[in-house]
Image (tube, helix red, strand yellow):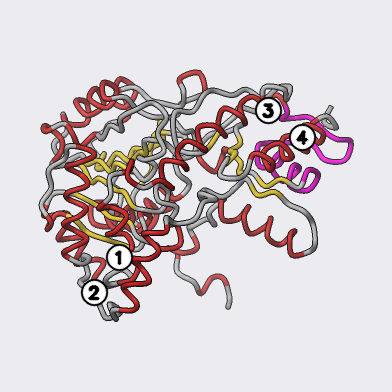
């Protein structure tokens, strides 16, 4: 197909950097090279047995026909109960929309709220897909920079400086992909007060990493009554329950936004897979502490974070902080920019990741893909043995750069 026959919409999009690095590492693996993939944001655990059994049971009971666009009532009720139980958030069933992953839930919200030319404020580093989704909605991304010195968090004062008459939406994740940063209740309240001053400014709160939190209780910006009606809470089962392939996410919002998402979704995907919905029902009905596999996964992620930080402390020029959630470390690597192995000059973080893929056979993601120039993202959703071997290879490859 000739490139210019494609729509401007699709031509404007970039391939997801995380998926790109995953694809490149698979290509090397297919060529017989031993590549360790630290680029993918996917728990290396299996879905809990009781949840799998619920999916199998749904097949046996022939729950395999078209579901309602917004999701089965039983699942939507379970989501409202979960939001009350875990987050003290009150939503009615008709305010919940179940989608094909949290990614679709976010896309629904943006496409329902953003008009051409509207500004969407995004703190950096951000998940790679946010700006691309803004492009799809024909909005304009307005990026607020942060750094490792501030634990990759932005303040209410910073946010206020970026609000203009064209601002329509503020989107962020906590715990954050790629930094692992977690906003406290006080930090969220201060940001919410600033956002609330503009009465047509909405919030998409991406809480998909809620259950991988090392600092205690998860805090949602929707807990503040003065802004709740303008918040779209997005969550799902992928990360917390190791259910990435089941493709179930959900949003909770005011009824007007929920109705709009229902209309939109009804025209381009309809309801999510019935079997996945029934498995997700089982997952969400249990309190997080009740599923042994989930508690163990959380414990191991924290252990791996500490282990990886200890390993990286021995790599010269790699500056790290302690991430409070998710399963990523986001070190600053400007020490290596401009260096060369005598053959290749490392011009930026993308060059560094490609160099480490080629020389160390370790797949990472460049920070610039997340709006964090001169950073790289490590995923520690893998075994300790893989982390040990990866850092060993990386250290050896970096020693060649002068």
What numbered label is drawn on residue 392? 4
Q: Position of residue 12 (x, y in %)?
A: 48, 58
Question: Is residue 336 rendered to the left or right of residue 305?
Answer: right
Q: Is residue 329 left or right of residue 113?
A: right
Which callout, 2 or 4, points at the residue further toward the start of the chain?
A: 2
Pointer 4 local density, CA inside 10 Å: few below 14, some 14–19, many at least 20: some
Real-space Cα distance between discs 2 and 4?
49 Å
> At 42% across and 29% down in the image, what residue appears?
214
Residue 337 quadrant:
top right
Residue interval drawn in magenta: 336-360
User: Could you tell which of marks 3 and 2 lies nearer the N-terminus?
Assistant: 2
Q: Nearer the viewer, residue 157 or 6?
A: 157
Please give the label number shown on residue 311. Answer: 3
Q: Which residue is mark 1?
A: 277
Label 3 Cα crowd, 10 Å radius (few <14 / some 14-19 / many 20+): some
Mark nearer the N terminus (1 vs 4): 1
Sequence order check, earlier mark of 2 and 1? 2
Residue beneath disc 2: 67
Q: Are marks 1 and 4 in contact (CB under 8 Å)?
A: no
Q: Secondary structure at mark 2?
A: loop
């Amino acid at each position: 197909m000739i490139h210019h026959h494609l729509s401007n919409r699709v031509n404007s999009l970039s391939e997801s950097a995380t998926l790109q690095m995953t694809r490149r590492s698979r290509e090397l693996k297919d060529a017989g090279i031993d590549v360790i993939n630290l680029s993918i944001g996917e728990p290396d655990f299996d879905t809990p047995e009781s949840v799998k059994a619920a999916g199998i049971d749904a097949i046996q009971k022939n729950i395999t026909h078209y579901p309602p666009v917004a999701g089965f009532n039983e699942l939507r009720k379970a989501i409202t109960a979960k939001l009350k139980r875990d987050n003290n958030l009150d939503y009615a069933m008709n305010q919940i929309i179940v989608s094909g992953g949290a990614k679709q839930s976010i896309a629904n919200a943006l496409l329902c709220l953003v008009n051409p030319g509207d500004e969407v404020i995004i703190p950096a580093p951000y998940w790679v897909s946010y700006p691309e989704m803004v492009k799809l909605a024909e909005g304009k991304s307005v990026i607020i920079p942060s750094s490792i010195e501030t634990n990759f968090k932005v303040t209410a004062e910073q946010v206020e400086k970026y609000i203009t008459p064209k601002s329509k939406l503020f989107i962020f994740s906590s715990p954050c992909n790629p930094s692992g940063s977690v906003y406290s209740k006080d930090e969220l309240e201060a940001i919410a007060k600033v956002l609330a001053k503009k009465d047509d400014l909405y919030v998409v709160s991406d809480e998909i990493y809620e259950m991988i939190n090392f600092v205690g209780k998860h805090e949602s910006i929707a807990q503040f009554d003065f802004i709740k009606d303008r918040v779209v809470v997005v969550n799902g089962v992928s990360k917390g329950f190791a259910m990435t392939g089941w493709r179930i996410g959900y949003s909770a919002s005011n009824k007007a936004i929920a109705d709009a998402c229902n209309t939109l979704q009804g025209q381009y995907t309809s309801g999510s897979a019935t079997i996945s919905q029934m498995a997700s029902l089982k997952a969400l009905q249990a309190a997080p502490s009740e599923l042994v596999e989930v508690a163990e996964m959380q414990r191991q992620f924290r252990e791996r974070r500490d282990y990886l930080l200890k390993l990286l402390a021995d790599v010269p020029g790699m500056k790290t902080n302690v991430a409070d959630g998710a399963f990523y470390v986001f070190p600053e690597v400007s020490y290596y920019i401009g260096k060369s192995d005598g053959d290749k000059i490392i011009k930026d973080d993308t060059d560094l990741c490609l160099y480490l893929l080629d020389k160390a056979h370790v797949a990472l993601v460049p920070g610039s893909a997340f709006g964090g120039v001169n950073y790289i993202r490590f995923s520690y959703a893998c075994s300790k043995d893989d982390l040990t071997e990866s850092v060993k290879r990386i250290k050896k490859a970096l020693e060649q750069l002068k």
